[in-house]
Image: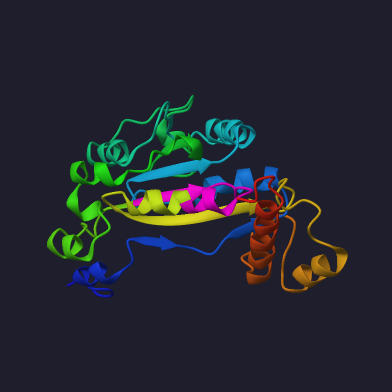
Amino acid sequence: MNSGWPRWLDFLQPKVQEFPDTFMASRSQLNQQMIHWLPDPERVSLTLLLVHYPPTFEQLQTVLEQANVPYQIHVGPLSPPIVNQMHERQWRFRQTSATSSNQRHPTAGVCLALTGQLSLPTPADSRSLPRHSVKSDSRLAKNPVDPSTKIGVLVAERHQFRAQDDRVRDFCRSLASRCLLGYFIALDDPLMAGKIDRALQQLLEHYGMRPDEPLQSALLERLLRRTQRNALLSRPDGT
């Protein structure tokens, strides 16, 4: 008999399970660490590795190649129906130069894409989506999401404007499967560079931040949100 969390209680879990932001000191170290954060196949069957900016996209592609992780680069708009098909049909992922037996870190297949490719459904599209992917309590009750299917969504950086990050969450909510969502930020990214003074640096080190180790910090999350808010206020149109 299985013990632990009863399967039927999975319906009580949120559609999108979002984890606290994860920070690292440098972009190069964070990119290398991303491989270790990819969910294993027993937990999810598909991982979307999303980035906002092309330089990070190219860096992560190199990291995936070097780590021999099966992945695919999606070209063109990435809509919920496309992701659902990837998941349901066990989408074939490209094998890198080494065989899967030599893969350093067993993972579910990875789809690498830019967030600018995400195509959010419009109200008119709702009729063509699975009913349980439409944000409606009554429909969710009649067509519950299968709790055994999950998609991992890892966003390798935060955008200058918070609304662009929120689009990823909205996209996750429109999928037919439950999602595990996490954002990852390097302190030397343009968004955060120069925002940490010596006093804050010493405080972070006091609470355990090391150059080669990840850290989840409410203090850094507040600094990040303030930086994004200031970026929004400094836009010429103020929007």
Residue 216 can be seen in this image: yes
Tell me the quarter of the image containing the N terminus: bottom left
Query: Which range is magenta?
Result: 151-166
Task: Determine if the magenta segment contains residue 159.
Answer: yes
- Residue 166 in percent (x, y) is at 49, 54
Asked if residue 114 lies left or right of residue 146, the reply is: right
Q: Given the current orientation, which residue lies at the most extreme front position?
A: 237
Q: Position of residue 60 (x, y in %)?
A: 58, 36
Which residue sits at x=30%, y=49%?
175
Residue occupying the point 34% across, 54% down: 173
Give x and y (percent) for residue 66: 57, 32
Q: Quadrant of residue 32?
A: top right
Asked whether, in this view, residue 136 is left or right of residue 111, the answer is left
At which x and y percent is residue 22?
59, 59
Image coloring type: rainbow
In this rendering, the answer to whether 231 lies above or below 9 is: above
Q: Is residue 104 visible?
A: no
Q: Is residue 120 magenta?
A: no
Please name whichever residue, 217 or 97, is drawn nearer the observer in this view of the structure. Answer: 217
Residue shown at 47% from the left, 27% from the top: 96
**Vertical relation: 206 (above or below) 63:** below
Taking the view exactly as shown, the residue that stands out farthest to the right is 198
Q: Nearer the viewer, residue 177 or 225?
A: 225
Q: Is residue 36 above or below residue 104?
A: below
Q: How many marks?
A: 0
- Residue 48 placement: quadrant: top left
Pick whichever, 80 or 226, lies toward us: 226
